[in-house]
Amino acid sequence: MRDNALWIILQRLRTPLIVIIVTYAIAILGMVLIPGLTDEGEVYHLTFFDAFYFISYTASTIGFGETPYEFTYSQRLWVVICIYLTVIGWFYTIGALVSVISDKTLKHELMKGRFRRHVNKLKSDFIIILGYNYVNSEVIKRLTSAGIEVVLVDHDIDKIHLFQLEESSMGVPVMVGNALFTATLENAGIHSPYCKAVISHFYKEDKNLRIAVLIRFLNENVNVITKATLRDTMTSLLDTDIAKVENPFEIFAKRFDIALTAPHILTLENWIYKNSDLADEASFLPQGRYIICGYGRLGKVIKEKLDKHGMDYIIIDEKGIGSKEMIKNETFIRANADDKEVLLNAGIESASVLVAGTQNDIDNISILITARKLNPELYVIARENTMKEISIFEATNANWLFMIEKILINKTSLQLSQPLKHAFLKRILYQDEEWGTSLVNLLKAQLGTNPQLLHLIINEDKAFAIHQALKEGESIGLNILLKSLEDWENYHKAIPLFLKRNGDEFLLPCDEFLEIGDEILFACDSLSREDIEIIALNVYDLHYVRTGEEKQNWLWRKLFG
């Protein structure tokens, strides 16, 4: 690939270099042709090397004096002409050089060259992140803290400079470029065998669709993780199966549905995302009338869930986009929800839940405050469109904040940095309240309110001892990993939560026999975590928990056997 930066430098400095060469050539030629006198009065001519040497230090204003003899008046006259000639040439060249160095195109090409070299040197899995915004900034922090390499591309140089001021930017290659162009994706390493995923969270969803299609043709082995909230975009992405689609409104709708039927599942989800621990009280969403302020994407998915459960609601939206059936059944009010009288007419004083779900954060805060004055016992769900206003929303004491950006951050970072936890979370979202309550109580009873999660892979690197035993045809049950190293007849406190094997997934596997390649998720404390890792790796400890006997090594046998 041609070095564009070098090409720009050569192209821009071509004329200045010619000027320098010509002025030096004229000055040197004159010094050679003009005769001088030796100390004995004999005529001599400077050699080309002597002339070049003299002009070099004279033109650069160093000035070592006349050499090899004092000059005649003819030579001195020519030197005066040379001084002005070469200084003018140098001024012109230096000006051109400064202009080239400050040229935006050259800076862009130099950055691109460094970026390309950095990406080519990556010999471990990495993620391409397209566009710098709050969501991607937080995702980068979480991925890099998990030891995952990332590269960043954005079309705005100012955003790139802003990112480089962050601590998380250390070691992250960046490039200014338009992600909609194939060349930009190729420079970012889309063809690299180490490129595992591309994150595209652009606000304009047609960009996300275009990028997903491009990447499908450039490297179909790369996963595309993208945001889509519009029905047409989602349909195109899902029908063609070219990306993992994240729709924060659908994600919240699922959580809303769970909160109506299985709140302990949400407790587990918040624990996995580290939003809270298991001590949080799980409670069902209140029964009674729901007042939905704003009938946009959020209002529509909440209405669908309320209809599913046959619950009472009324919608307030000043745009008047409710269906004729809704207006006829008096479940839709065309008005500004931030109006005391409108809320009173909607039954705010006897309502159970208010959803402040407009696309304007200030309107949502105002609606929330007005509603709470009219009904202090009201359960409030508030939509926050940008994390910039999070401190204000937290001050309102809303019961549940729907934060689009936080949902995207949590989901994207979890599925890339901890895929087994993400797979476990997806499975438990479809369990019922009885299952969720049972698991939460079990975890709290054995491990406390904030257990750790351990991802163990049965391979040579993470579980050497078990891997070797399985290769030799031995049968090892999962319960072996739960035995205590202090007393092999007892068990430590860890709880197996999830098993992934050859694409199949199992919840709470307790009596499975292990196979090479198994991935197991445990809930544990620090002591049980250490036991599991040691048993999996160390052949002597594995032998002890299987037999109750210490395995003798070759030195012991040689000395005492």
Image (spheres, rainbow, N blue to C red):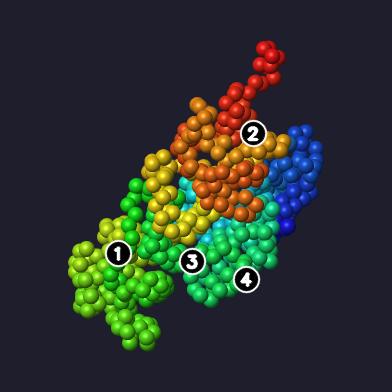
According to the picture, the residue beneath numbered tag 2 turns out to be 465
- Report the residue at 41% width, 62% height from top: 258
Left or right of residue 541: residue 49: right
Q: Which mark is residue 240?
A: 4
The numbered dot on residue 247 is 3
Alpha carbon separation for disc pair 1 and 4: 40 Å
User: How far apart are the alpha carbons under marks 3 and 4?
Assistant: 17 Å
Image quarter of the C terminus:
top right
Q: Are marks 3 and 4 in contact (CB under 8 Å)?
A: no
x then y, percent, for residue 318: 32, 80
Q: CA distance from mark 2 to mark 4?
A: 43 Å
Q: Label 1 sits on what residue type?
A: Pro
Q: Amino acid at mark 3?
A: Asn
Q: Badge 2: few (under 14), some or many (20 or more) residues near its Cα, within 10 Å?
A: many
| Mark 4 burial class by Cα count in 10 Å: few <14, some 14-19, many 20+ | few
Answer with mark 2 or mark 1, whichever residue precedes in sequence.
1
Q: Earlier in the sequence, mark 1 or mark 4?
A: 4
With 322 as the anchor, is 38 left or right in this view? right
| Residue 47 relative to residue 375: left or right | right
Please determine whether, in this image, residue 137 is positioned above or below residue 496: below
- First in sequence, mark 3 or 2: give its number: 3
- Amino acid at pointer 4: Thr
Query: Residue 60, how many percent across, how many down?
Result: 63, 45
